[in-house]
Image (spheres, rainbow, N blue to C red):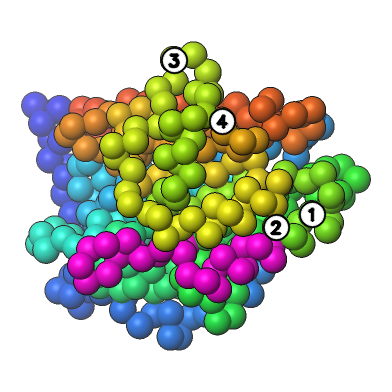
Amino acid sequence: MKRTISIVTALLFGILGFFQTTDIEDVYNKGDIMGLSNTISIVNRAIPDFSVDEKGDFTVLQVTDTHLMNGLAINDTRTLLSIEEEIDTYAPDLVVASGDMVEGNNNSDSYHKLSALRSLAMVFEKKQQYWAYVPGNNDGEMLGTAADVAAMLSQYDYCIVANEEGLSGATQYSIDLKNAANKTVHSLVFLDSLGRDEQRSLICFQDDQVAWLAEILAAKKALNPGIKVSVFFHVNTPAFKEAGELGVPYRIGYKPIPLGSLENADGNAPADSVMQNSACVSLVSIGHLHPSSNRCNYYNGTYYHVTRASGYDPSKKPGCTLITIHTAAGSTRCMYNFREITFKYTFCHVLFSGVVSRIIN
């Protein structure tokens, strides 16, 4: 009897929590945030620097493709609780959310974009955990563009998101990692890989984005000629196919990049050329492909890495990746450790240990 009461109480608190954090008007418009970027600008938004530890290491927890419906559904709750658990377990220096954090074209009555984004952001506010966001192709498909999503998330203290004046896409920015002597020893670069056109074909990186990427990589090398750079965005480029065919898996047990699941992204080839010609990009890490397990190949001095989806899905086990960057490593090949993490939260976990705790806290 007590257990039954606990279940009912948890569900009631969940419903009440939804209305407490969501304006009544928003309930009827499904959390439409269209136009928010017209009033909130992230252009040249301040970006904090981060420090590596005494060994030169820096840890990134990459989550991707959570595809949240409203932030309060059972699977959404499992996803968010799982992210909280991995933050507690690994205490990463930074979380990277690499796109498709909310559902795209979804007409379900339970879909609520604003509530989903608030629920995601509050995970990091609660943990006082910095996180860097780049959009996926789904994030701006309805009820607000990717720029509106970025504007909404920029209102949270621990969300890192910014853009350059006049650039295509919602987010382009970089984060520098510094050592004890205040020298930049590694950089993280983030780009918006855009969405789809009316025919559902990918819109690839635009010329101004590619030019910005070339400029930012040149600027990093000017700061430190030996610097290496990790690049994060959502959709694959043609180099992922080359890496899958010709590259070497990260280690024994890692499956090669699944060529059959790669999008036709030939239009992203100019970005590949810029990164390869720079000779400083040591990692390109994406989401989007929803592989059953993480994939990572080393090719031409660069790791091409695909993180499995972090959202709970009936067909695949969700998870994320802990990426340790060894900035003091003697070679690019030895610069990264990729730890694949499988989420463990079950339906029972949510009912008996998660929901009430999340709402109360």
In the image, the segment drawn in magenta is 192-216
Type of the residue with mark 1:
Lys
Do the residues under discs 1 and 4 have CB atoms within 8 angstroms?
no
Disc marking residue 253: 3
Asked whether disc 4 touches disc 2, contact meaning CB atoms under 8 Å apart, the reply is: no
Q: Are marks 1 and 2 in contact (CB under 8 Å)?
A: yes
The answer to whether residue 71 is seen in the rendering is: no
Determine whether 326 is above or below 39 in the image: above
Residues at marks 4 and 3, CA–CA distance in whole angstroms: 14 Å
Q: Nearer the viewer, residue 304 or 94?
A: 304
Cβ atoms at labels 1 and 3 below 8 Å apart: no
Question: Residue at 83% of width from left, 58% of height from top?
Answer: 222
Amino acid type, mark 2? Leu
Question: Visible in this render: residue 187?
Answer: yes
Mark earlier in primary sequence (1, 3): 1
Which residue of the protein is positioned furthest toward the bottom in this rendering? Answer: 38
Look at mark 4 in the image and give the residue it sits on. 298
Residue situated in front as seen by the camera: 184 or 182: 184
Q: Residue furthest right?
A: 181
The circle on residue 217 is: 2
Q: Which residue is mark 1?
A: 221
The answer to which image quadrant residue 261 occupies is top left
Say which amino acid is labelled 3: Gly
